[in-house]
Structure formats: C-alpha cells, structure tokens
Amino acid sequence: MLRRRDDTLMVIDRPYNNLLRRLDADDYALIAPYLAYEQGEADELLYSPGDDVNTVHFPCGPSLATFLVANEDGRNVETILVGREGAVGGIVSEGYLPAYTRISVKFGGPFVRLPIHKLDAAKAQSKTLRNVFARYADCMLAQIFQSTACNAIHSIEQRTAKWIISAMERTDAEEIVPLTHEQLSTLLGVGRSYTSRVIQIFKAEGILHTRRGAILVCDREALQARACLCNESVKSHFEEVLSGVYPGAEEGT
C-alpha cells in the first residue's frame, strides 16, 4: 500500500489535482475532512483484478497512474494514463466493486486518497458533486475509446510520439520524461525491440536523446508533428465536458 503522509486536508489548502480544484467550495467541503496525503512509488500497485475498490486515488502534480490489462502471453498493455486531471478507483460506482484491471503508479509522487464510502455519502448530498464525477467518468471513457482506435490504426512511430507528449503534458516536463524503454513498450503494447527501433529513428532525426531511465526531448515541435491527433481529440473532449481540468488547459487556482 502507499505510505500515508497526512491524515487530513483542509479546504483552504487544496492539493494540486485539477479535478478536486474543479469542485466548488461547498462540494469540496463535503470530502475535505476525509482526504489524506500519500506518497506513491513508481510501479507501486494500487489494485489487482478482482480486488475490492474501496479507495479513490487522486494523482497530484507530476504523479501519474496507469491502467494495465493482462494478456494471455503474460504481457501487460497500458490503456490510459491518469494524472492530475483525474482519479482512479470507484469514480462513479456506489459500493465496493471488483477491479477489472491492474492499476498502478506510473510516475511516483504525491497522491491524495479518499475512501469510496465517504465519496458516496458526499455525492448523495450534492447533485453538483455527482455531476462533476460523472462528467469525469465520461472523459475517462473517451480516452479508452480513443486509445482503442489509436492502437488499431496508427503506426508505432505515431503512438510513441503521442505517449511521450501525453506524459510531458501531465508532468509539466519541459525536456526530460522519466520513461524507460520497458515502460514505453508497455504503453505501446509491443516488444522492447520495436520500441528501441523507433527510439533510434527519433534519435537519428534529432528529435530526442535517451539517458538512463529517461527520455530527453530535443525538438518538441518535431515530436508533435510525428504524433497522431489522439491527444488533441481527448483534450478537446475534456474542454467540452470539464473545462480547465486537462493539463495544459487553463487550470484552476
């Protein structure tokens, strides 16, 4: 489990999570006494398939969580990344339900957790709170749809560029993204040799370099030009449904 750092979070000191900052003062007050800080370590497991989902985890700042689907060949394929624009675990469900996928910490850092029964009680008191979380669930579903289409029709080069840019946006990385070849392979759902081949192509074109445990982006415009438009589609949907929540949009204070 993640290490607990603080017991409560006061309303006047909201965490750096855009979904929580999107709530109005009255709605935030309903859950603030039950929020707790925790420190997530990279690759730390939050849920395994079949686990009771009893806690919502909100990534804060540069922290990222990921959903992984296990396949019969033993590989895990990542479906979506979740950063400070959202949360993982029991977003719209009522009561404890089993997890379908593995959910783990992708990039370590601060998280905030909330017991699901406390969130359910707050949603029972506030229609606007229910609405915000329902809208976020819609945005998460849009990401899953877009990821499915992306895997089916876009090249490995396009998807590699997309995932690197997506990680940069969610972590505020200017140049360095803490992605290893192995992690990128999991995002792409391909073997490491394919990922290494694409990285070598991008390095030869001067788009990026690699260092131990990280990717150094040298030409973000060129990387963006090589990416598919899936990130842009997701961001556009976020702006329509939950304006200002997706990183890079006009974030709340």
Image (cartoon, helix red, strand yellow):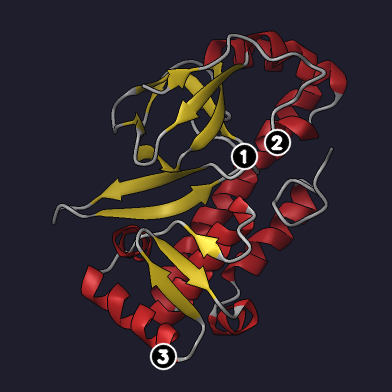
Q: Which residue is mark 2?
A: 19
Callout 3: SS: helix
Q: Amino acid at mark 1?
A: Gly
Q: Which residue is mark 1?
A: 86
Q: Amino acid at mark 3?
A: Ala
Callout 2: SS: helix
Image coordinates for residue 35, horizontal then vertical, percent: 62, 16
Residue at point 64%, 60% (across, down): 234
Nearest to N terminus: mark 3 or mark 2: 2
Nearest to N terminus: mark 1 or mark 3: 1
* Residue that protrudes farthest toward the left in the picture: 73
Rendered image: mark on residue 250: none
Rendered image: mark on residue 204: 3
Q: Are marks 1 and 2 in contact (CB under 8 Å)?
A: yes
**Location of residue 174 by image quarter:** bottom right
Q: Is residue 118 above or below residue 104?
A: above
